[in-house]
Amino acid sequence: MTVRLLLADDEHLIRGALAALLALEDDLLVVAEAATGPEALAMARAHAPDVAVLDLQMPGADGVKVATSLRAELPACQVLIVTSHGRPGHLKRALAAGVRGFVPKTVSARRLAEVIRTVHAGNRYVDPELAADAISAGDSPLTAREAELLELAADGAPVSEIAERASLSQGTVRNYLSSAVSKLGAENRHAAVRLARERGWV
Amino acid sequence: MTVRLLLADDEHLIRGALAALLALEDDLLVVAEAATGPEALAMARAHAPDVAVLDLQMPGADGVKVATSLRAELPACQVLIVTSHGRPGHLKRALAAGVRGFVPKTVSARRLAEVIRTVHAGNRYVDPELAADAISAGDSPLTAREAELLELAADGAPVSEIAERASLSQGTVRNYLSSAVSKLGAENRHAAVRLARERGWV
DNA sequence: CACTCGACATGACAAATGTCAGACGGCCGG
DNA sequence: CCGGCCGTCTGACATTTGTCATGTCGAGTG
């Protein structure tokens, strides 16, 4: 029984290499490849693969978004996410989106093949180290508004601009940011943005 | 005549896949692999490869630093850098360090093999798109001091801390940062840091 | 119902930041 | 050789930002 795969990664080199490597396994068959989020969705619709192996960072729509759409349209297709930089928050969001597997790109090809089989069998697999990170990092302590304003502050915009974009008074914006900063134990909002990004909370 | 290769990339999956793919070419032979900068250097010393294929981002020391050391220790070994995110400044630094080839990971394996042969023959190859980016981005307009202080400001540290670490008065630090900010056309120093990073100037 | 708690919102005040004008020394072209 | 330019450095001033005290609203609880 062969497992039909969709491979999505924006790096041609990696994707091709991965396809070649997985083709060495007798029971795995790559039926489609994609370089962007939307392309991955289109390919999935066209080929209805058993398992979708998605990179977390892709142009267009990230792996988690693609996974969400995929769960809705093709419930039979299991999703496995592969990522370079494992941020704890991403893992949590991915699992919430119905992703069945989550592994870093540091695993060997052999292990990846095993994980693909595990996921195809209907089981879950999360890389132990990433899981430990996610647990130790815990849930985001930020409220919805705090996270939202932190995102608006991400590119270094001044408070006045954030206030305008969020339709709030500057004082309110400062208050939320200040709250987020103290919750994250940061020096200032910019360091807070950095921390929240690292943990995948924004 | 076979080309002996050193492959360095921190992502096990990618590195293995790449090795498998390059092994398909008759004239290419992967003689060593490494996951970190220092490891790459050690492997290069041990195996004296003809061409070193280095990822730009690795733990320990980045591709450019490794390339610099390699040029000094093994002049016969040509260096080719492969990267996910092509920042113009990195390309410039890489070429200054004696790197002979620079390509993004979006190229196909076939093309990579061609580039390896080109580099091995003593010629240079730079991805046309990255080259165009580098040219349009131009040189860094920042003075040494400005770039240095911008780096110290990178993690959101307050001016007082930067001043202490650089042994300067706070006023001076503000002045350099202000200068850098205006040169980059940014809103404030945090946005400036972001821009400088994007262009590979820090 | 009365109470508490947390999210949301605001303005006033103190601290940090950005901007400005200016001083000093090295370097290059006339 | 000397005048102008650039990089380096500094303190004074206005603006922006962070912190605090305070208030409203709705959800959950005794």
Image (cartoon, coloured by chain):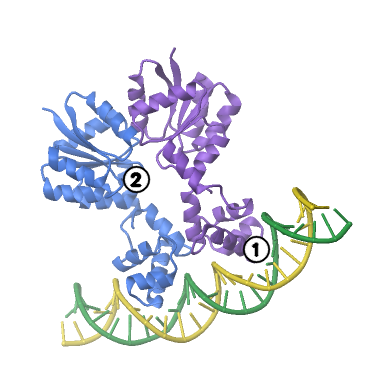
Chain colours: A purple, B blue, C green, D yellow
Residue B84 rendering spot, x and y as whole percentages: 35, 41
Badge 1 crowding class, 10 Å Cα cut-off, few under 14, some 14 to 19, many 20 or more, is few
Residue D20 rendering spot, x and y as whole percentages: 63, 72
Badge 2 crowding class, 10 Å Cα cut-off, few under 14, some 14 to 19, many 20 or more, is many
User: Nearest the camera: B21 or A125?
Assistant: A125
Q: Which mark is residue A35?
A: none
The quadrant of the image that shows the N terminus of chain A is: top left
**Residue placed at 13% from the left, 43% from the top?**
B45
- Pointer 1 indicates a residue of which chain? A
Does dot 2 land on a helix, a strand or a loop?
loop
User: Nearest the camera: B95 or A118?
Assistant: A118
Check disc 1 and give the amino acid type.
Thr
Does dot 1 land on a helix, a strand or a loop?
helix
**Is residue A27 toward the left or the right of residue A180 in the image?**
left
* In the rendered image, residues at marks 1 and 2 fall on the same chain: no
Q: Which mark is residue A172?
A: 1
* Residue sitting at the far top: A1
**Residue placed at 54% from the left, 63% from the top?**
A158
**Is residue B114 toward the left or the right of residue B166 in the image?**
left
**Is residue D9 toward the left or the right of residue B47 in the image?**
right
Residue at mark 2: B86
